[in-house]
Image (cartoon, helix red, strand yellow):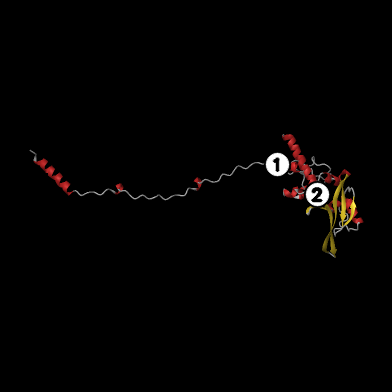
Amino acid sequence: MASPSQDMLSLSSQDSSQHEQPRSPSPSAQLLPYKDAPRRSPSPSSQLLPVEPPRRLVPVVAPTLIHPLARSVTASTSTTARTLGLSLEQYATFDENGYSNTWLADLRVKTKCLDVFTSKHKLNLLVQEGVLVVGDQIYLEIEVMDGEVVVDNIERWATITSVARGHLPNLALYHPDGTQGGTLTACSGPSQILEALRKLGFQTEGEGREPWKQLKVRRGGEEFGTLDLVRQAFHRWQIEMKAWGAWKGGNE
């Protein structure tokens, strides 16, 4: 037989269960719809930047004094002037291809580098080394003046037609209108060219100036400058190549 207290507990529990309302799930337990998280752009430090390849060191021939390397130069040669210090690849290209009258312009080297010495190379040496070739024009440009005004430029020229013994050039002399006015055989120097022009009645400007600096050189329409500039540029190239040869001898 149940005690009164047990009956009361049973009634209270039954009563509470009859009045208890269903509970909604807590907010933390609710399933929320899925949303993509906003994408963040990578920080600059995490971005992959292009990697620059390491710079290739170009080996060069160290500049050396040109005075001991130059030959046939006057005493005015600068004792402190040095070679250009070009790359080994450039010197090797010179060695393979030979001399070019445009080598300074090709390398964008100023002709000021020629002022540190005075070459005494002869005309026949330039022919022998291919600095001057058959077909080259050695010309004189004369300014026609009207008072103090230059009204025209007239050219008289000598074209190398062949080479005599000793690498002395034979030349044909031409008037401004292109007609041939004479020949010069086995020419030994520019002073002979000027003298030949005088005999043809050509007026020569710049009396007293060195013939090497009066005459200019042209090949197929390409201007090389004065004969003196051509000689100086070739001599400087020889100096550079001699420096390269000395470097090779000590590093191979």
Q: Which mark is residue 149?
A: none
Q: Secondary structure at mark 1?
A: helix
In this view, the residue in front, 20 or 67, is 20
Provide residue 103's location: percent of width, then percent of height.
Answer: 75, 47
**Residue identified by numbered label 1:** 89
Q: Quadrant of the N terminus?
A: top left
Looking at the image, residue 85 sits to the left or right of residue 162; the answer is left
In this view, the residue in front, 200 or 170, is 170
Provide residue 183's location: percent of width, then percent of height.
Answer: 89, 52
Looking at the image, residue 214 sits to the left or right of residue 49; the answer is right
**Residue identified by numbered label 2:** 230
Query: Is 106 located above or below residue 59 in the figure?
Result: below
Answer with mark 1 or mark 2, whichever residue precedes in sequence. Answer: 1
Whether residue 97 appears in this view of the structure is: yes
Disc tally is 2
Q: Residue furthest left?
A: 1
Q: Secondary structure at mark 2?
A: helix
Where residue 130 sits, quadrant-wise, is: top right
Q: Residue furthest right?
A: 199
Q: Quadrant of the C terminus?
A: top right
Provide residue 135's location: percent of width, then percent of height.
Answer: 82, 51
Amino acid under disc 1: Glu
Provide residue 165's location: percent of width, then percent of height.
Answer: 88, 44
Q: Are marks 1 and 2 in contact (CB under 8 Å)?
A: no
Q: Residue at x 76, y 41 (%)?
A: 241
